Image (cartoon, helix red, strand yellow):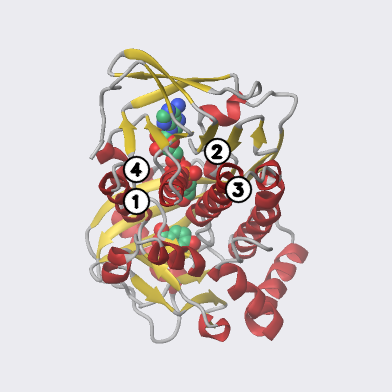
Amino acid sequence: MRESRLGDAVNRQTKVAIIGAGPAGLMLAHLLTRAGIETVIFERHTRSYVENRIRAGILEYEVAALLRETGVGVRMDEVGFRHDGTNILFDGALHRLDFGALGKHVMLYSQHEVVRDLIAARLVAGGEIMFEAEVNAIENFNQGKPRICYRINGEAAELDCEIVAACDGFHGIGRASLPANLVREYDREYPFGWLGILAEAPPSMDELIYAHHDHGFALLSMRSASVSRLYLQCPLDADLAEWPDSRIWDELSTRLAHPGFSLTTGPIFQKNITPMRSYVAEPMQAGRLFLAGDAAHIVPPTGAKGLNAAVADAVILARAIEAEILTDDPAPLQNYTQTCLARIWKIERFSWLMTSMLHCFDDHSAFDRRIQRAELDYYVNTPTGRTSLIENYVGLPIEGV
Ligand code: APR
Ligand code: PHB
């Protein structure tokens, strides 16, 4: 087991240097290790920090299948929940979307649990993760001989490699290292946030509810048989001090109300407010440097696509690296951006659609509101609309889209 905290040598080398031990970096390392390709992961935080970072928790059908097929799905199947449908609520009426129509399901299993499973698998396989190692420069990736400069335990060190995978999240060094004149950014900020809570309360339903209400969006989700995860659309400048527990529960009850439903409440043990943003940077590569996951794109959380998009990039990148290293075929790596973006823009579209359709916008005219209502009606009440929503929710195929 090589969970190193101290760089064991100053000048070292590997095939693929991976920056970031989030879902993208860990999945990429996992797949490459299985293909016999050596990797080193750099992670600026501690193991405990990344293993306890609370994020969303819906795994698409193919992502869950990938975890199973590659030997990291055991705990997911033991303690996660299989969901065969989800629910959209508007005008006080609940509409169930049955995934069985497409023969698929999703798994409710938290991102930090996936991270724990991938870290455990890597350490068992003898792979290396340098925790508390911060990468501060990526050199020579345009000259074909990349070098990672990092600091560990207060000391500077370097590592030479053939490929750099920047899986270092939205604020990482990977995207910042791409030549500025090469990169084009596409961005949308939404005029509201999500107030999220974790509560010791058994989930009020066994599936999720995405609710559109005149007061704003609400989401009922869960973490376990005894912990609920719930969200409320709130103003961007909302102050948690103005949201005592009683106000949160009242608002959730109002927005989630429908016949036969009663909201289970309980002690709230975590509250946070997150902004909502869509963002894509193109291209996702330059020379021998490749971006994956949040480093290249982010989505608003409506639809829970962030983790799934990060894993899909990792799969596409792993296959492309394998093609180059194992079969001498450079084409998939050359086409990496193009392959990823074809899928990413569909995920961006879906996350934007779910966000636009389900939230309230202060600047909406009466006309806009009627269109929004028609859109909800179309997506839940017509066969084509419903199929499209389900197909995207359970996840588009990872390759071949
Ligand atoms: N050196 C070392 N590690 C770094 C550096 C650096 N210079 N910069 C960032 N990192 C690490 C971060 O500490 C983080 O652990 O990179 C990791 C990136 O992980 P994530 O942010 O989880 O990104 P990703 O793997 O793309 O997963 C995306 O996470 O943000 C959620 O909703 C998002 O579910 C999605 C998922
Ligand atoms: C969550 O459980 O945190 C969650 C679920 C579904 C979403 C977003 C977040 O769309």
Q: Residue at x 52, y 49 (%)?
A: 314
Which quarter of the figure is the C terminus placed in?
A: bottom right
Looking at the rendered structure, the kind of residue marked 1 is Leu
For the residues carrying marks 2 and 1, which lies nearer the camera in this image?
1
Q: Quarter-wise, where is residue 199 in the image?
A: bottom left
- Picture quadrant of ligand 2: bottom left
Disc 4 marks a residue whose amino acid type is Ala
Relative to 95, 78 lies left or right = left
Which of marks 3 and 1 precedes in the sequence? 1
Q: CA distance from mark 4 to mark 2?
A: 32 Å
Expressed as whole percent of the image width and height from the top left, the position of residue 48 reads 25, 40
Disc 1 or disc 3, which is closer to the eye?
3
Residue contact between numbered discs 4 and 3, judged by CB atoms under 8 Å: no
Can the viewer see residue 331?
Answer: yes
State the SS at label 4: helix
For residue 252, what is the image quadrant?
bottom left
Which element carries disc 3, helix, strand or loop? helix
Residue matched to label 4: 241
**Residue farthest to the top?**
155
Does the closest atom of ligand 1 sit within 8 Å of the Cβ of label 1?
A: no
Mark with earlier residue (4, 2): 4
Q: Which mark is residue 327?
A: 3
Q: Earlier in the sequence, mark 1 or mark 4?
A: 1
Q: Position of residue 232 (x, y in %)?
A: 45, 58
**Residue under numbered circle 1:** 118
Residue, disc 2: 295
Nearer the observer, disc 4 or disc 3? 3
